[in-house]
Every structure is written in C-alpha cells, then in structure tokens.
Amino acid sequence: MKTETELLPLLETLYASKNPTRRWLHRTRRDWIIAKARECARTPPGRALEIGFGAGVYLEALAETFGEVVATDLAAAHLEHARALAARYPNLTLKRDDILATTLPERAFDLILCSEVIEHFAESARALVAMRRLIAPGGTLILSTPQRYSLLEIACRIAFLPGVIGIVRRIYGEAIFETGHINLLTARAAERQIIAAGFRIRERFSSGMYLPVVAEFGGERGLRCARWLERRIRGGRMDGMLWTQYYVAEPR
C-alpha cells in the first residue's frame, strides 16, 4: 500500500490520464461538483467546508466562490500539499480534523462538500450526523461516493487480484493503485443514511459508465460508447452500474 505522499501525484494524474475513459470518469465528477458548488453559492458569498480534500482538486474553485473556506483532512501529506494554494488564497484555511470527532463549530457552514470520502471508513452514518451538526440553517451538502455494484468497483476487485494487477498496469501504461474503499454503499443505503442524519435530499445524479475491455482498448470510440450507454441507463433500473452517485441535500 502506498503512502499518502506517494499517492498525491498519482491522484492528480487521473485527470490527465492517457486513457480516454479513465480521464472522462474523473473529469466528469470534478466538473459536476464544481458547477454544483458554484450554483449553490450565496450572495454575499458564505462559508464553505470541504471534508477530506485529498489532492485538493476543488479547493481553488471553492476559494474563488465562497467568502471563507475551511478544508480538512487527516493526512499530513495532503495538508502540506495544499499549503501553496492556501498561500494564494487568504480566505482558505487548512485544518487537520476528523469528522467523527470534529472540533469545528456547529451550524457554521453554508456549504459542506464531501466527495469520495465516506467509502474510506465504516462509520459513514455517524459522519453524516456530524455534518448535519456543522451545516448552517438553509445550507447545502454536496456528497459523492461510489456505487457499491458499479461495473468499475466490481472490475477493481478483480484487477487487484495477485497476478492480475501487473497486467492491468502494463495495459494502462500509468499508475494504478488500490482504491482503499471499505464502505461501498448502494443508492438505497446512501439515501437512507442521508435522511436519517437529518437531511432532505434535493437532487440526485449519477455518472461513470465503465465497460471492461472496451475502456482499456476502445480509445475514443470506446468512450463514445460509454457516454451513450450512460445516458441510456441513468435514472433507470440499471443506474447502479454507473460508478458515482451524487447528492445535493439540505437540513430538515
């Protein structure tokens, strides 16, 4: 298992991958979340919190959209990596904080962003309850997490079997690393936890059609096929095949 320091440059390369499908999967999520965060911003600009910012792909957009941004993470490497960005944006504060034992003030944030975080620890229901305490009245939660039975997550379980991962790395010709996902939720389970925490779901979305073999060898034609199929199944009975589920919610 790689350290956080080793993973940071790998996380950043996902958005510039040589593989069209891999690049599209990550850019779609990034662009949707940035657009939604900007859409949810208030006038005058309010206060935003990002929980588990990782490589920091959303921090610049948040700092340019909100009056104050607090960005939390547990990994020292992530906090150090973001210091240069914090130096450019005086309204961006970096803080080591565990959402399950948070020291942040209650009812203080107009926007909370938690993207690709809750799948990394088992107690996601507790984390959502904590987020509910932190959000201000009338605030917005933007949450994304992988779908438990998406084709990509299923393929990942196979890809990291002994003897298989070496082949996968040779096919892609770039960094491939374990996801570390230990708490994959179905849409039903995710929605149940969000509602039980005291939120009302305002908007749902899903993206990320991954077709094994086609993604690896189909190039741009394979990507066009994945896009077409994604549009066909989104919101239907096979929606769970798509990789990422997104929620926009507000406190009840």
Image (tube, rainbow, N blue to C red):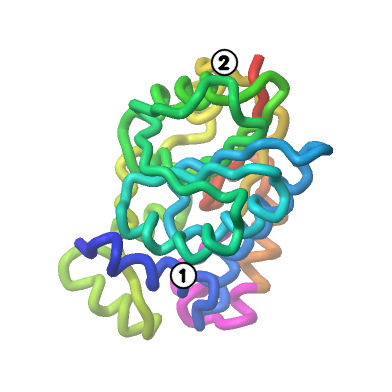
Residue 170 vs 122, above or below: the answer is below
Left or right: 17, with 99 as reference point = right
For the point 32% across and 66% down, the residue is 7
Using the rendered view, name the quadrant where residue 232 is placed: bottom right
Quarter of the image for the N terminus: give it. Answer: bottom left
Coordinates of residue 16 in the picture (x, y in percent): 53, 77
Query: Residue 198's mark?
Result: 2
| Amino acid type assigned to the residue bearing label 1 in the image | Glu
Coordinates of residue 11 in the picture (x, y in percent): 42, 66
| Amino acid type assigned to the residue bearing label 2 in the image | Gly
Give the spatial CA distance, label 1 vs label 2. Answer: 34 Å
Q: Tell me the crowding category of disc 2: few under 14, some 14 to 19, or many 20 or more residues within 10 angstroms, Cα based.
A: some
Q: Can residue 209 be found in the magenta stretch?
A: yes
Answer whether residue 93 is visible to the viewer in this image: yes
- Residue identified by numbered label 1: 12
Answer whether residue 247 is visible to the viewer in this image: no
